[in-house]
Structures are given as C-alpha cells and as structure tokens.
Image (cartoon, rainbow, N blue to C red):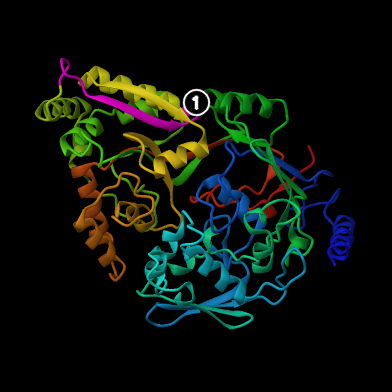
C-alpha cells in the first residue's frame, strides 16, 4: 500500500509539473514566470518543533502554514480567508461557531480531511499528556472546559468541540468571543492525522512519516541546517500554487546570511542590525521595513531577589533609553515602546502611561532615587545577568542596555547567550534574572499580548501575579468594549514592571525583486509560499 501511494504521488507530481506554470505567465498579472519556481530563505534558528500542536515560535509557524492548513487562513492584507472551511457561522451570542469543510480537502496520503481531524487536533492541543507549550492558547479561545482539561481536572473528550458530521465542525465557547474566527488561523488549531501520529509517535514529523494537508509536503529536514518542502499535488487548491519548492536554511549569523543573499544563495534574509538605512540607499528595491504586530521586551523574574522589589524593576525600566536603541542601533523605523501592546493592534487605543511623558533625563533621575531607596548605589552596586538567544542584534541591544544601566545606576551587568532551544527551556523553567523576550500577536486583538500578564499564562515568564490584572482580563472577554480594561492593565504594567517594553517591531528584510506576492500589508506577517512566485530575471 505504501509503495502504491508513493507511485500515486509520483504520478500526480509529474502531472502537476506537466500542467504547472513553468515557462508560462502568471494567470492574474500576466508576468512571465521563471522556469525554476524555488524559494530559498534564511529561517535563522532551528524551530523547537514543526508539529502544529507543539509549535511555539515564529519560525515553526512559518513552516507549519505551508505543511498544514487550518479552518481559515489569511489574505495578503490580513483579512480572513477560507481554508479547509469554505464558510462559517456563529449564533447570536457569539459563543458557538460552526465551520463547514470543503469536500475536496485531502491529506497528502489521499485520506479526506474531516471534522474529526480537527476534533482530534484540538483535543490533542489541550491534552496534559502532550504538554503543548501552546495549550493555553485553547484556553484563550474560551473553548468550553479547555482550562480544566489543561489542569488535568477533566478528560480531553469533554472539550467543547464536536464533529456534527464528516464535514461540519462546531466549537462551543464559555464566553462570547466576536473575534474567535481570527483565532482559528493559528497553527495550534490546524488538523492532525491521527493514524500517522499513533503509528510513529514523536517521529511523525520526520520526512517520509509526516502526513499533512497543506500546499506543501516535507521532503527533507537536516537539523540545524535545512528544511525542504515541496508541492503537495493532493492539496485542494494545488492548481493555483506556483512555487514548487521551498528551502529554509539555518543561518544564525545575520552578516553571513546577508553575504549569502548577495551571492544569490538566498531569495530572502533579514537586514543586519543597524544596516537598514545604508542598505535601503544601496538596494532600494530589495530592502523593506513594514509594520509588524510584535513587541520586544525584557522579562524580569519577579520571583528572584532583588527583582521581587518593584523599585528595582522600575529603576531598570526607567534607565533604558528606548530612543537610542531604535534610532542608533536598529535604525529601521522601530517604535520606542512604553506599553506592551503595539499601536498597530486592531481597535486598540494606546494609553498615555506616565513615564512615557517624562524626558529621559527625568526618568534617569527617578531611577537613581528608586534604586537608592532599594539599597543600591555605586558603592553597593546591583548585579544583573541578561539572558538572550544567540543573535548579533540581541547582543547589541543587551550591550547598549547594560551600558545605560552602568552609566545611570552603576549596575554591573553580565551577558549570557544561549542557542535558541536551550534559551527557550532556560527561560521557561525560570532559571534567569532578566531575559530577552518578544511576542508577536497570535491574532489581531490586544488580548493576545495582555493575556501574558495573567497569573496562569504559560508565557508569563516573569512569574508575575496580580489579582487585578487577572480580574480585568477575565472580565474583558464579556465586554462590548474591553479597551478600558486593557488601558488599566497597561497602566499596571507601567507601575509594577514585570516586563520592560523596549520597542515595537517593524518587519525589516531583504527580498529579491524577482520574488513576487509577498504580503507586505499583513501586520501579523502571515505568509504562505503558495501565494508567492518567481518572475523571469
């Protein structure tokens, strides 16, 4: 049977190539297409996982969106688009959503994609046995019994999801959630092929084992080196796909990636830190900076002394000159951050927190006073360790902040960098004092950021606990206008500083002029290789 399926896929692949777009023109724009439709990019670090229910980072999400398809996807401008679900509807209370699946959706082995696959995947995401780092996302979605299942208090079968039939999937929520459909474009909610997972266990994501339902299949994966995905001829919309092959390389050094981009080995790479302005003048048609729904911050471990002292945390936060970081180090339009939630977030009103109105000189003076009150001065300096994952950009920011703290407060800072997976584990178990962190919105609503400040959030790396924040965020789910609650939570963050907001991202990258179809207007940076194409060059 396995050989038969391989033969079917091979024949389908040949048919796809014989009827594809090679040496033709784009069906919509009329642009002449290159004969080789291959997209090669730098993914930076090896992702911890490409299992949709275990993915926890941007890199893994980029890969998962090619290999799998959820109920809904996104258009180039970030608006919702049908995925496996052709259409969906909600009841008047917005606490029950029904999705109607297309009948021509197939897994890469030929099996039909059904509502049962989504039930299995969503139950899997909350199953304590899997211990998904993103299980809390299902709780944020307000799915009935999700929280109790994650805590081991109820069986996974009690999750508020069901298959009304093979092509109708329904989710029952504990609260009204008008933006629920935008949440099901996330990787955690993608379907999973039960038979494959039960057969191969944790090896199911290896090439040759993986069965997926996206526009591409996994054909090669060499850890810490490269990952290759190629067109899935059984994808329901394969005839609209143009890119045949996607190659993701692991290149941690941003300058090495830049050189390989110049050498033509990469079609896309990041802009080296601080080089945006120079490169924009040098290569105006290849250098981009667009808004992105992400915040860069430092997490302070509030359970470790002396960082349990709000005066110490506030002094460190005040002494960071965000303008210097964005203007002199990053230089690509990043926005100094005084709140956690970026202004690009839909329907979010950025509050004017008091310290944002102060001059840096005033902040520095207040920082010295607070640190002195806490018992630290130049004769008895505070000692701090900053943990960050290996990256030249993160290193430059850490060095700059350590110098600011030393000059303003006399703080002695040690810098510690770790490889990505090790760093994530160290931060997750709380074995740090201050750690570099970043959060990109899982959906376009302020709660995707502020939920991290709740006591029970899996991504509350600061181990911060504030009953008022918990109450405000829980209450916000039932409000027609949650912005007053969001404003108060931001004010509390600016009073207690479990985190130090540093800047709001722009997406800066290098992109070859011949690679077309990039979704520049998608602030969540959700891109799909199936929408890209290479023109003749």
| Left or right of 245, for residue 455 | left
Q: Looking at the image, which residue is at 60% across and 66% down?
A: 191
Q: How many marks?
A: 1
Say what secondary structure mark 1 lies in.
helix
**Which quadrant, please, contains the N terminus?**
bottom right
User: 10 Å neighbourhood of mark 1: few (<14), some, or many (≥20)?
Assistant: some
Residue nearest the viewer, comparing 20 with 195: 195
* 215 w.r.t. 40: above or below: below
Give the left or right position of residue 18, taking residue 56 as reference: right
Magenta span of residues: 377-393
- Residue tagged 1: 392
Q: Nearer the viewer, residue 290 or 460?
A: 460
Provide residue 470's location: percent of width, then percent of height: 25, 59
- The answer to whether residue 168 is above or below residue 140 is below
Q: Quadrant of the C terminus?
A: top right
**In front: 148, or 453?**
148
Which residue is at the far top?
A: 379
Identify whether 325 is placed above or below 90.
above
Residue at far left of view:
373
Task: Tell me if residue 519 can be seen.
Answer: no
Kindly identify the residue that appears in the image at 40 percent across and 77 percent down. 94
Where residue 354 sits: x, y (%)? 17, 41
Give the farthest residue toward the bottom.
164
Left/right placement of residue 126 relative to residue 5 reads left
Can residue 220 be seen here?
yes
Q: Please tell me which residue is depicted at 56% across the width and 51% down the height of the picture.
A: 61
Q: With 41 as the anchor, is 436 left or right in this view?
A: left
Depth check, front residue: 125 or 522: 125
- In magenta segment, residue 307: no
Measured as percent of width and height from the top left, residue 425 is found at 45, 42
């Amino acid at each position: 049977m396995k050989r038969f399926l391989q033969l079917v896929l091979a024949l389908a692949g040949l048919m796809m190539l014989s009827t594809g777009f090679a040496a033709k023109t784009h069906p919509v724009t009329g642009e002449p297409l290159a004969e080789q439709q291959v997209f090669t990019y730098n993914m930076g670090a090896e992702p911890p996982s490409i299992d949709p229910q275990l993915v926890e980072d941007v890199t893994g999400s980029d890969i998962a969106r090619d290999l799998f398809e959820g109920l809904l996807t996104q258009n180039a401008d970030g608006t919702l688009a049908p995925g496996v679900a052709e259409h969906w509807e909600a009841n008047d209370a917005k606490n029950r959503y029904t999705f109607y699946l297309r009948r021509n959706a197939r897994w890469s082995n030929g099996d039909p994609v059904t509502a049962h696959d989504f039930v299995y995947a969503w139950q899997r995401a909350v199953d304590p046995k899997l211990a998904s780092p993103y299980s809390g996302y299902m709780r944020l979605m307000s799915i009935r019994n999700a929280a109790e299942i994650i805590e081991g208090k109820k069986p996974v079968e009690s999750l508020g999801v069901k298959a009304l039939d093979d092509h109708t999937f329904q989710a029952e929520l504990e609260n009204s959630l008008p933006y629920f459909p935008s949440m099901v474009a996330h990787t955690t909610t993608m379907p999973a092929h039960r038979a494959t997972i039960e057969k191969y266990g944790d090896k199911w994501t290896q090439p040759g084992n993986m069965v997926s339902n996206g526009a591409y299949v996994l054909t090669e994966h060499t850890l810490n080196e490269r990952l290759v995905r190629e067109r899935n001829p059984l994808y329901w919309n394969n005839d609209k796909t143009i890119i045949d092959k996607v190659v993701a390389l692991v290149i941690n050094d941003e300058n090495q990636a830049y050189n390989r981009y110049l050498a033509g080995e990469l079609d896309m790479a990041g802009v080296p830190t601080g080089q945006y302005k120079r490169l924009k003048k040098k290569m105006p048609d290849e250098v981009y900076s667009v808004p992105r729904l992400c915040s860069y911050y430092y997490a302070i471990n509030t359970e470790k002394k002396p960082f349990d002292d709000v005066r110490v945390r506030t002094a460190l936060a005040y002494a960071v000159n965000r303008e210097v970081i964005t203007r002199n180090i990053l230089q690509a339009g990043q926005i100094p951050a005084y709140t956690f939630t970026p202004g690009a977030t839909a329907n979010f009103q950025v509050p004017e927190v008091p310290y944002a109105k102060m001059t840096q000189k005033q902040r520095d003076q207040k920082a010295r006073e607070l640190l002195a009150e806490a018992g630290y001065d130049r004769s008895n300096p505070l000692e701090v360790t900053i943990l960050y994952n290996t990256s030249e950009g993160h290193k430059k920011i850490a060095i700059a902040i350590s110098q600011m703290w030393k000059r303003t407060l006399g703080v002695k800072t040690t810098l510690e960098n770790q490889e990505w997976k090790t760093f994530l584990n160290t931060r997750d178990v709380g074995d740090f004092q201050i750690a570099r962190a970043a959060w990109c919105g899982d959906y376009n609503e302020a709660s995707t950021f502020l939920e991290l400040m709740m006591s029970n959030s899996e991504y509350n790396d600061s181990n911060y606990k504030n009953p008022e924040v918990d109450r405000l965020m829980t209450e916000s789910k039932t409000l027609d206008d949650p912005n007053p609650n969001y404003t108060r939570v931001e004010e509390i963050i600016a009073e207690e500083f479990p985190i130090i907001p540093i800047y709001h991202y722009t997406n800066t990258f290098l992109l070859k002029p011949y690679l077309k179809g990039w979704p520049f207007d998608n602030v969540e940076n959700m891109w799909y290789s199936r929408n890209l194409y290479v023109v003749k060059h």
